[in-house]
Amino acid sequence: MDFKELAIYANLFMTVFLVLMLYGYIIHLYRSEKRGEKDYEKYGKIALDDEIDSKPIEEDPSAENKKEE
């Protein structure tokens, strides 16, 4: 097995690995949105609603703790 053959196998392995990682990430996003853990569509609207006076996507939980103290 020479270097060219090894490079071809390494390229094929990395391509398959990265495709599997991409599909796994897409499935993770889909499942977490269906369970109601996160709504990723809100984050997609950040580019459209980019005004200084627009409300935040998520409230900062540490800010609430500071208000209580």
Image (cartoon, rainbow, N blue to C red):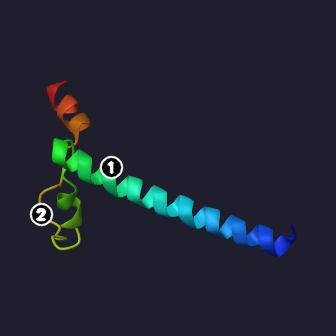
Tell me residue 27's x, y (percent): 32, 53
Q: Secondary structure at mark 2?
A: loop
Tell me residue 16's x, y (percent): 55, 63
Inspect the image, locate mark 2, and give the three-letter code of the amino acid beneath it. Ser
Give the residue displayed 25% in from the left and 53% down from the top.
30
Quadrant showing the C terminus: top left
Tell me residue 46's x, y (percent): 21, 66
Classify residue 8 as left or right of residue 32: right
Inspect the image, locate mark 1, and give the three-letter code of the amino acid beneath it. His
Q: In this orientation, which residue lies closer to the viewer: 22 or 43? A: 22
What is the number of the mark on residue 28? 1
Give the residue displayed 17% in from the left and 34% down from the top.
64
Give the quadrant of residue 57.
bottom left
Q: In this orientation, which residue lies closer to the viewer: 8 or 28? A: 8
Q: Earlier in the sequence, mark 2 or mark 1?
A: 1
Q: How many numbered dots are placed on residues in this image?
A: 2
State the residue lying farthest toward the right: 2
Tell me residue 45's x, y (percent): 18, 67
Q: Secondary structure at mark 1?
A: helix
Give the residue displayed 38% in from the left and 54% down from the top.
25
Q: Which residue is mark 2?
A: 54
